[in-house]
Amino acid sequence: MAPPAPSERSGNAHEFSVSEISFALKKVVEGEFGHVRLRGEVSGYRGPHSSGHCYFSLKDEKARIDAVIWRGVFSKLRFKPEEGMEVIATGKLTTYPGSSKYQIVIEALEPAGAGALMALLEERRKKFAAEGLFAEERKKRLPYLPEVIGVVTSPTGAVIRDILHRLQDRFPRHVLVWPVRVQGETSAAEVAAAIRGFNAMKKDGPVPRPDLLIVARGGGSIEDLWGFNEEVAVRAAAESEIPLISAVGHETDTTLIDFVADRRAPTPTAAAEIAVPVRAELVDAVMDRSRRLTRAEARFIEQRKNDLRGLARGLPRLAELIALPRQRFDSAADRLARGLIRATEVKRAQLQRLEGRVSLRPIRQRIRDRRERVSEVAARAERAERRHLADLARRLEASSKLLKSYSYEGVLERGFAVVLDENGKLVRGSEGRKPGEALNVEFAGKDRLGVVVAEGGGTQRAKPTPARPKSGPAPKQGKLL
């Protein structure tokens, strides 16, 4: 709805609500201006809000306008706003009815010319220098001959080919390439991720951890090299535990990563030359030092030989050195023999004196007493043994008689007999006996008589089993009652 003409009286003017007039103004501003480009200085920038959006102002010497960058746009910006930075913002004007303000919604942001970039570069350089990131004592010593070299660069450019070719000519090494974009909005984050990725590798892992890093890119404008001036890339290079060589741009190009690197190379090819020595020159140097060491060793040995010969001429002859000790030895040997003889004689005399003091009579008397006691004890032991054996013999004879009285043979001698079957078992009665069964009748003196069981319970004589041989004809068989 359009506002009323100024000529209308206030009494006939259209009555607007606050919301109606605010949204009417919003439509007018957005329809009249649409997309604009504003040049101004960033003011009141405090970084992204917790929501991810950015709120600040753009100002010049006479006016100020609020600005907002939505979260999705902010993450894609190549250049992030910084306090006091002069920028050119592209976006659309709109109003915020909640506070009766107009603002620009920024869709693109860039520094206001090369002068602004240089000013921003100088400001960042002072900031990092104040933090001590450029201090010489922080820089690490490069390894003399690294086994593995990590290169952070574009895999398709001429830079990596120049580095590999130069390393092959000087001293071939194992090279790991971490491909990154070296220009554009994401280049700084990719370079930082590559540096941190190489540092995160384990020394004994499946992929060997580099001993040296090279961050390289060809020449270009300040805008092309701006990714190597971003804070994320600079801090990643400063935090690297692996020694790092910066080779960004040509010799006259300078970026902030050059100041924090442990060594700056004017070109990527020069970085390869710094990384490794010339193998042929190294071999020649080693061979030259080996020859010099051999010659020095020969001179040293010859000089010591001359010194030894000079000292030997000043020494007395060996025979003269040992003449006096030899005489002392001979004299001591003579004295030793005589001393042994005298010592033997002294000991013999002492022994004779001791023999005279010692009497053998008591000893001999004690020996005789001991012998008499031994003889007496032996006689007593012999008598005791005879008595013991006689007692054992009497006991054995009594036991033998008792055993014989208990034996069935004693019963047989009193006129009794015992009946045995064919198996030698005792027959206690006629029960169970069958006619024709052979039995043995044993008498005293092992005398046996064979019989056969007859009908009706009687027996007939038969050949004993076994039978004792007898003289004369066999007796006739008859019945036993």
Image (cartoon, rainbow, N blue to C red):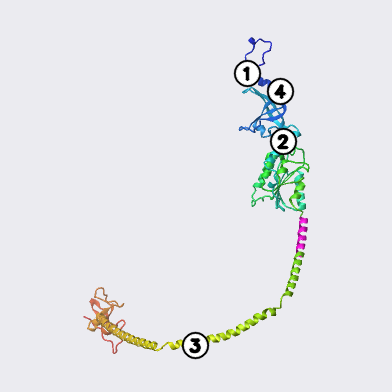
Kind of residue indicated by mark 1: Glu
| Circle 4 residue | 33
| The C terminus sits in image quarter | bottom left
Highlighted magenta segment, given as a residue range:
279-294
Single out the mark in the foreground, 4 or 3.
3
Single out the mark in the foreground, 1 or 3.
3
Magenta-colored segment: predominant secondary structure? helix
| Circle 1 residue | 20
Real-space CA distance between mark 4 and mark 3, rounded to the nearest whole angstrom: 147 Å
Kind of residue indicated by mark 2: Leu
Left or right of residue 323: residue 434: left
Q: Position of residue 467 (x, y in %)?
A: 30, 84
Whether residue 194 is visible to the viewer of this picture, yes or no, is no
| Circle 3 residue | 349
Left or right of residue 37: residue 452: left
> Judging from the image, what secondary structure is the residue with disc 3 in?
helix
Image marks 2 and 3: residues in contact by CB distance under 8 Å: no
Kind of residue indicated by mark 3: Ala
User: Is residue 334 depicted above or below 177 in this figure?
Assistant: below
